[in-house]
Image: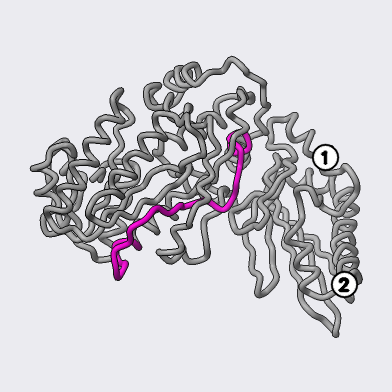
Amino acid sequence: MGATGHLGSRLVPELLTCDHEVAVLVRDRMDTARFPTNVLVHVGDATDPDAVRKALAGNDLVYFLVHSLDQPDFADIDREAAAVLTAAAADEAVRQIVYVGGPRPDSSALSAHLASRAEVGDLLAAGPVPALVLQASMIIGAGSASFELLRSTARLTPWVPVPSWMHNSSRPVAIADVLHFLTAAASLPEPVDGVFDVPGPERLTYLELVQRCARVLRLPVRIPVPAPLWSHKLAAQFAGMVTPVPAAVAEPLFASLNHDLIADGPPAADVIPAPPGGMTSVDNAIRAAVTSEAEKTDGEVFTEERTVLTDASPEDVWRTVNTLGGKNGWYTVPLVWTVRGMVDHLFGGIGLYRGRAPEIAEGDVVDFCTVVHRDDETKQLVLRADMKMPGHTLLDMRVDRKDGRTRYRQKVTFTADRLLGQLYWMTQKPLHDIVFATMARGIVRKASAAHQGR
């Protein structure tokens, strides 16, 4: 149920890929054409007991992904649909109900949206059929109302209004991870009855999330503007005019931002295996939800390499490499990247972002760079510079052993964009040599200090 929504429309293909037999219930007969011929499509309303019973007949598991947020009485509709489902599931001997709701902050004054999500979860859990209730903060995926509001906020203007509720936090989760848990639930050997959270890997305030989205989109940092009078209704009306999300949907979503939505209860991984490789980073989740411009690969290529030997262990040097950026800086000439970032920002680039995830993976952002490749076994980290320049720059850092000592290798590759790119490389190379030579020595010096400190 809810097969045409943001989650359901993506879940059906995943279930088919895993060779499950799938039946769906849709309200509009026109929606039947959206599904492959091997999907059994029933037409009816989720509040119609007869239609729901027919859709559940012969099925072991039912996903309840219904959410009527676009209706003014959405709480009443979802409450009725949940009550109909619990009765019909019992009548048709369904073994398992799976539901996706939102976190439950410690507050007696929940927004209507969060209160409805919690109420539906409670109704399903109180029924006679085991209910697996999954609670997630913002789900990052193209088409999600919450994500579309985030993306529009990050892209529309260089300023972002910051009322007090923009400082509350959540743990946004990639839609790919939510789909993993939903799909895996269909293969559980025994029914699961309980409430479990699906938290993303990072806790971010909503303002930080806007900045992170802008960063991944390669936009300049958004300038926060205090806005104590920026109410949920005003924000929703503005969103309704400039985003694809209707004001009636945006307002209850904005109202939910009055709370920290952390999802820090028992994790879903306690009962369902976590995604291979762990949860998706926020950067990669955003990147997967947007369309990136094709990278240019032509042009004359310039390279510059440096090698530094040290008695520090490879692990110490590799650890230092992986903590570059953010508060740790880049171990080079003081303020050089700050000035470069200011110039870049002045010309409409992303500037120098002082931030990074605690643990980085491919696709994550580190200040003004994006992680292209990371391999802990071979100890190689490749970063792409995202500042404005007439070409493309890669920084390749490797750690290995040579003649009984640890070797740190650093290679900069610049692919010039025609003649302007070549001139850029030649004019900045003297300073470039100083900056990157200092950086290589600084990384090794930091690793050596850590090695001697133990």
Which residue bears the numbered disc 2? 454
The number of callouts visible is 2
Say which residue appears at 16% left-offset and 35% top-offset: 28
Spatial CA span between label 2 and label 1:
32 Å
Say which residue appears at 68% left-offset and 30% top-offset: 348
Residue 54 shown left or right of residue 285 in the figure: left
Residue 349 at x, y percent in the picture:
69, 35
Residue 88 forms part of the magenta stretch = no
Which residue bears the numbered disc 1? 338
Count neighbours of disc 2 (C-alpha within 10 A) and say few if under 14, some if 14 to 19, many if 20 or more.
few
Residue 157 at x, y percent in the picture:
59, 24
Residue 181 at x, y percent in the picture:
39, 58
Q: Where 382 falls versus 86 (above or below)?
A: below
Amino acid type of the residue tagged 2 in the rendering: Arg
The quadrant holding residue 412 is: bottom right
SS state under label 1: helix
SS state under label 2: loop
Q: Residue furthest bottom?
A: 403
What's the coloring here? one colour
Residue 205 shown left or right of residue 410 in the figure: left
Amino acid type of the residue tagged 1 in the rendering: Thr
Upstream in sequence: badge 2 or badge 1: 1
Residue 109 shown left or right of residue 94 in the figure: right
Q: Where 29 falls versus 436 (above or below)?
A: above
- Of 386 and 216, which appears nearest the observer? 216
Residue 120 shown left or right of residue 449 in the figure: left
For the record, the magenta segment spans 184-209
The mark found on residue 266 in the picture is: none
